[in-house]
Amino acid sequence: GTLSSYWEANMELIDIIPVFNLYEEFWKIYTRTDTIPPQYVADNTFIEKSIVGDGTEVYGRIYNSVIGSGVTIEEGAVVRDSIIMNNSVIGKNTIVNKSIIAEEVVIGDNVELGVGEEAPNVKFPKIYNSGLVTIGECSVVPDGVKIGKNTAISGVTSAEDYPDGLLPSGGIIIKAGEVE
């Protein structure tokens, strides 16, 4: 599969009756779940056409997205058309557009993901080619940066990794210890 097909399959799950219907009475899905609390949705938040996992705390707004378990979406944050996997944190006043965010990721405050026009990815144009922002497991994105489309980030990054506070569309950051 591709990143695009993964994103599309997740977006199909939030249709009223998805193609892969998880709600059929005759086809129950049994699974062992972790013992975690239900979702917490603060006052003045908004969730539209989304799936939100157990243990997630929502203080911002979510539109058309799939959110895993144990995620925190801080006050003023807006998540749109995205997949956020378990135990990730989206900082205050952060905007997340058309992104795939892996597990255990921390996105700082006042960050914007998915900005600008699309451009081919500089290293892997055949992989990062559908306008998505892709952030790998256990990565950190610092406060106040902007990240374009068809981008990939892996590892703990700092403000110095973003010249002029921007990773332009088609850019990639892979920190030490990761495969280039």
Image: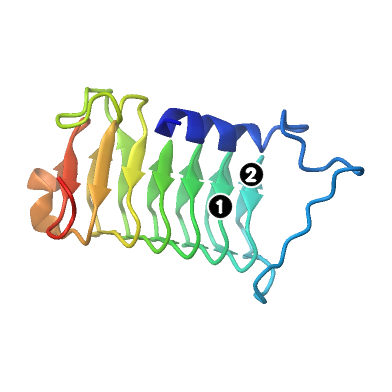
Quadrant of the drawing holding the N terminus: top left
Q: Write down the quadrant of residue 107 in the picture.
A: bottom left
Q: How many marks on residues?
A: 2
Residue at left offset 78%, top offset 58%: 30
- Residue 67 against residue 171 in the figure, above or below: below
Q: Does dot 1 land on a helix, a strand or a loop? A: strand
Do labels 1 and 2 touch, CB within 8 Å? yes
Q: Nearer the viewer, residue 3 or 46?
A: 3
Q: Could you tell whether 52 is left or right of 28 in the image?
A: left
Amino acid carrying mark 2 in the image: Ser
Q: Few, some or many C-alpha atoms within 10 Å of disc 1 (few <14, some 14-19, many ≥20)?
A: many
Q: Does dot 2 land on a helix, a strand or a loop? A: loop
Amino acid carrying mark 1 in the image: Ile
Quadrant of the drawing holding the C terminus: top left
Q: Write down the quadrant of residue 65 in the picture.
A: top right
- Residue 48 against residue 70 in the figure, above or below: above
Q: How is the image coloured?
A: rainbow
Circle 1 residue: 67
Q: Nearer the viewer, residue 165 or 29?
A: 29
Q: Could you tell whether 85 is left or right of 127 in the image?
A: right
Circle 2 residue: 50
Q: Could you tell whether 91 is left or right of 69 in the image?
A: left
